[in-house]
Image (cartoon, coloured by chain):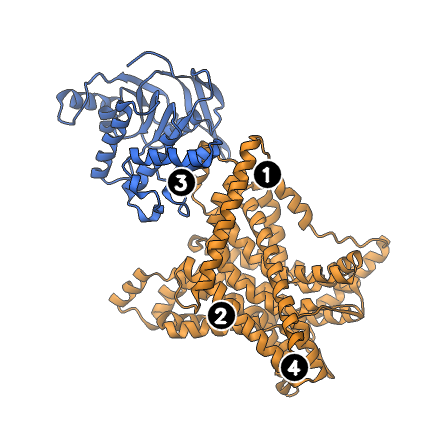
Chain colours: A blue, B orange
Amino acid sequence: MSTKLTLSIRGLTKKYKAPGREVLVLDNISFDVGEEFIAILGPSGCGKSTLLRIIAGVEKPDSGTVEFHLGREPRVGFVFQFPTLLPWMTILANVALPLLARGTRENEAREKARRALTLVGLGEFEDFYPNELSGGMKQRVNIARAIAIEPDLLLLDEPFSQLDPLTAETLRSEVLDLWLSSVLSLKAIIMVTHNVEEAVLMADRIIVLSPRPAKIVRDVRVDIKRPRSRKMPEVQELVDRIYEYVS
Amino acid sequence: MVPELVVATLLSLYRMFAAYLLSLLIALFTGIAMARNRVVEAVLLPILDVLQSIPILGFFPVVLSAFVYGLGPGLGGELSAIVLISTSLVWNMIFGVYASIKSLDPSFDLMASVYRIPLPLKLALVYVPASRTSLLSNSLISWAGGWFFLTSAEVISMGTQTLKLVGLGSFIFDASNRGDAQAFAAGMGVLFTVILATYIILWNPAVVKYTGLTILPGVMAVFNALERLTRLFWRLVVKAILRAWLYSRRLVLPSSTALVLVALLGPQIRPTGFSTGLLYGSLVKYLNMFLTNVWPTLLRVYVVLLVSLLISLPLAYLSHRRRAVGLAACTAGELLSSIPAMIWWPLLLPVAHAAPWFVMFFVYLQGALWYVYFNVMIFGLQYVKRDIIELTDVYKIRGFLYFKSVFIPAMLPSILTGLLSASGGAWNASIAAEYIAFGDFEVDTGGVGSLIDKLAAQGDSLGVLFVALYMSLVIVLLNKLIWGRLFARLGARFVVD
């Protein structure tokens, strides 16, 4: 991957105030993001999602900075753990919503939303309502919504953890295809997960976080050629090695 | 008589819908602001709690005088009628919106902030649709309360003056005062028809469509058309918002809208021109009056609540078992609960001489029962899910055990909500129930309600205000000390849907 910087994260610290005490969630997190797919791996509740929200700009850190090197306002797509679709709107309207909020004209927004839905294989379902779709399809809409805004950075918050194993597998390879095919203007992906295998199979780089407060334990480059599979010895070896860092 | 009746009906309908729209706007803004802003919540929740459970009727002469003297009897009377009807509609609508936004999945808020969805768009596309179902269900309950208050709203008495607005309520009131049996019957017939029609073509289809409840009879066509129209209108609203957003990306809709609401809602009653000594004297005088009269009312209120439960629960059970019973029970309930208070008098007159307490009790029940009844029927039965029914069938859980371990626990949240609203309703009804003057017949059973009526008849607004305030204080204390604790104890089971 190229070494061109997409964003730099410097010294992020975050505390939560509980009654009578403060809980440190993030402890001095710093790393650079190039044009690459990064997996952030850590135990449940370690503050991974908080980190993602800070990068997305919806939560403020107590100290530290997130700086994009794009020379303009960055576009950030976010795939939530749960589909988070508004049940009273068609999936087309759901996908178009962030575009409208950005000030895109309605026709153009619909066009872009349609294209995004086609990319995730739901082109024919645009008039369906979320409750008429399966769990996997809803998660696809969630992804379509994130890529419809033509993001520079895509944030994925354990996007496959709520799906059955088969659907998760299919969706993983679809996300990878989208990333590798460069149909998108995407510069980087940051995916939060607690699934070691998923991280090794998908990412160019894995950042391992400690239990709360989250600190960076390891920063591992994954130089295994694609397409990767579970059976490849180097995949298994790396999975084993990373399990040691995690535990 | 016919043209008169048509005009009266149209005017009453217009008042009902105007009051409904007013309540809808207040409910949406207040409910959403409370659910989304902690400061607003902390300020408004206790205020609404009080407003919901105090005898609004007691405060009304004061507010009405302000309207009528400020704006003249025409506009002032019209506005005060609409506001009076709203006070019987708005409370459960506010709480309905509040509960549904409060229980909205927080990930929607995360989504909205990640994609920087501006507040007006968020209101129109997330919050308002999210409160739709509970708003409609609560509207159905409120609607009956509105009709119930119709005559009181159209025939407003302030001290010695009476202001009468043209409408169905005043038409029937006049007819019965004149002893014109034919006009009375015609008025009643039209009233029943209009009430039933609004339920069958509007509220029942709305609730059926959004909750899947099957025990409400209705015709879908008109509602469907209306819904399409509303959707179209809403789409235009969203478009307008977007356009405004496009032209000025800095469109600021301050979240302090809510604060303005607080200022508007805060009652502007400030009796002026009293010296502190005089004020203190009146405080004590009215406190004594209040204390000697509060006990019978207190007892009656709780008896009425108990009877309301004893009527509602078995009916709910039967409705649950047989849809036909449910359809009949709901229709009867919608009709009976809507019949305006004053219309009951002539109907009750024959028994009134022999048993005045029965008339009192009946009016009390009319003011309280329906909150329990509809909460249990509309919300409660939804909690008794199909899988629970299968479970009880498989293990043959029946009779008392079924009631104790399945039916009542499943409906508990709605039973409690219903009882709380009903307690407010019962206190409010005491004013109408304990002192009844109809023609040359008078029922006076004593109590705080009767005290307020007599003070109002003497034109003693200050007395009415003080007694109503004391009454509110007692109700709030009871709610906090008894009901609040009971609620907290049952809290684990208290699910807000």
User: Which secondary structure lies at badge 1?
Assistant: loop
Q: Decide: marks 3, 2 in contact (CB < 8 A)?
A: no
Say which chain tag 3 marks: A
Is A125 located above or below residue B364 in the figure? above
Say which chain tag 4 marks: B
Residue B160 x, y percent position in the rendering: 81, 70
Write down the residue under mark 3.
A94
Q: Residue at x 51, y 41 (%)?
A: B239
User: Which secondary structure lies at badge 4?
Assistant: helix
Q: Residues within 10 Å of mark 2 (few under 14, many from 20)?
A: some
Q: Residues within 10 Å of mark 4 (few under 14, many from 20)?
A: some
Write down the residue under mark 1.
B255
Q: Residue at x 41, y 59 (%)?
A: B209
Circle 4: residue type:
Ala
Residue A225 x, y percent position in the rendering: 19, 18
The reply, left or right, for residue A196 in relation to residue B459 is left
Of discs 2 and 4, which sits in the foreground?
4
Between B462 and B226, the one lying in front of the other is: B226
The reply, left or right, for residue A111 in relation to residue B99 is left
| Cα gap from disc 3 to disc 2, whole angstroms | 44 Å
Quarter of the image for residue B411 reads bottom left
Between B407 and B441, the one lying in front of the other is: B441
Residue A169 x, y percent position in the rendering: 21, 34
Circle 3: residue type:
Asn
Say which chain tag 1 marks: B
Quarter of the image for residue A52 reads top left
Circle 1: residue type:
Ser
| Cα gap from disc 2 to disc 4, whole angstroms | 36 Å
- Residues at marks 3 and 4 on the same chain: no
| Cα gap from disc 2 to disc 1, whole angstroms | 41 Å
Write down the residue under mark 4.
B183
